[in-house]
Image (spheres, rainbow, N blue to C red):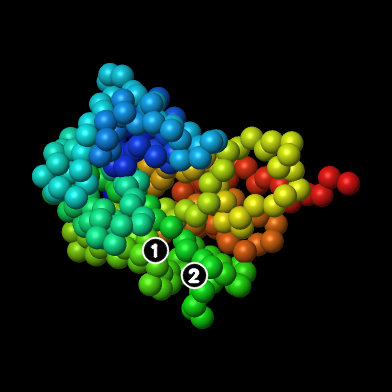
Amino acid sequence: MATVSSGNVVIFGAGGPVGAAAIVSLKDRYTLRVTDLRSMEEVAISPPQNPRAPIPKVLRAPHENRVVDITDYDQVLAACQGMDAAIDLSVLRPHPVLAFHVNMVGAYNVAKACAACGVKRLIHTGPFHTALNFNADYWHDFQLYDGIQLHPGDDLYALTKYLGGHITRVFAEREGLEVLTFIFTSFRPREVLPEERGRGLHPYTTSWEDTGESLLYGLRAPEMPSPYEDFFICSWLPHDKYRPEKAKRLLGWEARDTFAELYTRAD
């Protein structure tokens, strides 16, 4: 597959803070079709996920804002038409039925529509879950590389996203689709406030700004070694618990923010 260095990109589930970060990084380089279950006008005036999380802005022409239900294949297919690449940021966590509809069936709809429309590259997204309290959890391990087998256990969010990821892998292997799965966990702003210094952070953390940039690098990266590749998207922190080596090697992306102020004592 060719590098998608320009052209049309559809973003599913763009109404959250990751969508906001993606829009900032991509809007001046691509023509975006920004989609969510709610209108972007409604999203823009809604409260943020947390006080410092970014909120997506409503884009003007040549960009397009469209309401799309990712569980409706016909709507997803229409959104993928004429696109060079797709990014799936959609997620639903707590509901025992809708989590499967969005995280699993939604992933199926996006992958199927991309294959049908000849989309060059799909960036799928999902979580790296730890601290799930079972003996195959990775919480106590260090020097973990991207590409290790995910262990979702019976956690609803982790399991449904895990299944969605495997669905996109099957489409990549059988339908000629190139899928890059970006694995996230914890996000925070780039700016470190004075009162935060020395208080630590989650060992798998990415700034919102680096998150948006990672999606740009995912679109511009050259052809992958295999049709399906997954990547840790996080900062490489001093305790060396998570190693996003593949993202640097294959995408050319490396987090700028390592948050030294948060794990450095100020005495």
For this rendering, which residue is in front, 251 or 110? 110
Q: Position of residue 197 (x, y in %)?
A: 74, 43
Quick one: SS at disc 2? loop
- Decide: few, some or many residues near mark 2? Use Cα within 10 Å; few <14, some 14-19, many ≥20: some
Question: Mark 2 is on which residue type?
Answer: Leu
Q: Position of residue 167 (x, y in %)?
A: 25, 63
Quick one: SS at disc 1? helix
Give the farthest residue toward the bottom: 135
- Which residue is found at the position 53% from the left and 68% from the top? 131
Check disc 2 and report the residue beneath it: 132
Give the farthest residue toward the left: 74
Residue 187 visible in rendering: yes
Instruction: Name which quarter of the figure residue 156 lies in.
Output: bottom left
Residues at circles 2 and 1 in contact by the CB criterion of under 8 Å: yes
- Which residue is found at the position 46% from the left and 40% from the top? 49
Question: Mark 1 is on which residue type?
Answer: Ala
The reply, left or right, for residue 181 in relation to residue 107 is right
| 3D distance between C-alphas at marks 2 and 1 | 10 Å
The image shows residue 155, relative to residue 38, as above or below, that is below
Residue 33 visible in rendering: no
Question: Residue 158 bears which disc, if any?
Answer: 1
For this rendering, which residue is in front, 203 or 237? 203
- Decide: few, some or many residues near mark 1? Use Cα within 10 Å; few <14, some 14-19, many ≥20: many
